[in-house]
Image (spheres, rainbow, N blue to C red):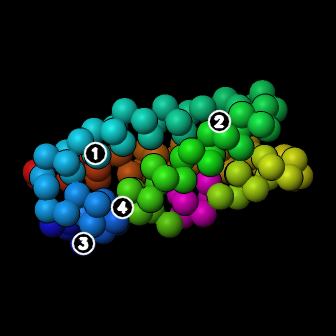
Amino acid sequence: MTDSTYKYINLEYMDLMADGDIDMKKVMLQMLFDELPEEVGKLASLAESGDMEGLSAVSHKLKSTLAFVGYTDMDTTNKRIERIAKDEEDAAKLSDLTALMLGFCDEVMPELHSEFDKL
């Protein structure tokens, strides 16, 4: 079961989806290890290049991944990025928002690894 002492992550949704299957939870965590830093890095690159269509697509895809992490601040920031990319307004905020996402990723990864190590 998920340790409620984590500062950033809330794995209730992941636990619900795994339905007690430890191997399934390990697979889901491994997916996060592989995909989360890569996708968040793409957000920063796409924002920097001004590729709003690509940014919107990656941000949209990231929403389902972030549901497994359960970090509200990260989810909210990602939704702001997607909205800006779709509306193509407030693009000046994207640099700060993607930097926030990179920081959030750095915060959640150790906790995700800690959860994996407990299994």
Q: Nearer the viewer, mark 3 or mark 1?
A: 1
Assess disc 3: are there few (<14), some (14-19) or many (≥20) residues with their C-alpha within 10 Å of its C-alpha: few
Q: Earlier in the sequence, mark 3 or mark 1?
A: 3
Q: Residue 119 vs residue 70: left or right? A: left
Q: Earlier in the sequence, mark 2 or mark 3?
A: 3
Task: Please state the extent of the stretch shown in magenta in the rendering.
Answer: 73-78
Q: Amino acid at mark 3?
A: Ser
The residue indicated by pointer 2 is 44
Q: Earlier in the sequence, mark 2 or mark 4?
A: 4
The residue indicated by pointer 4 is 9
The residue indicated by pointer 1 is 29
Q: How many numbered marks have been drawn onto this rendered protein structure?
A: 4
- Where residue 82 sits: x, y (%)? 71, 51
The residue indicated by pointer 3 is 4
Work out whether residue 80 or residue 17 is closer to the camera in this orientation and state it: 17
Work out how far the residue at label 2 is from the one at label 1, CA to CA, in angstroms: 23 Å
Q: Quadrant of residue 48?
A: top right
Q: Quadrant of residue 5?
A: bottom left
Do the residues bearing badges 3 and 1 touch, measured as CB atoms within 8 Å? no
Q: Residue 44 vs residue 70: left or right? A: right
Work out how far the residue at label 2 is from the one at label 4, CA to CA, in angstroms: 22 Å
User: Can residue 114 be seen here?
Assistant: no
Q: Residue at x 22, y 58 (%)?
A: 18
Q: Earlier in the sequence, mark 1 or mark 4?
A: 4
Q: Earlier in the sequence, mark 3 or mark 4?
A: 3
User: Can residue 23 be seen here?
Assistant: yes
Q: Nearer the viewer, mark 2 or mark 1?
A: 1
Asked whether 85 falls inside the magenta stretch, the response is no
Q: Amino acid at mark 1?
A: Leu
User: What numbered label is drawn on residue 65?
Assistant: none
Work out how far the residue at label 3 is from the one at label 1, CA to CA, in angstroms: 17 Å
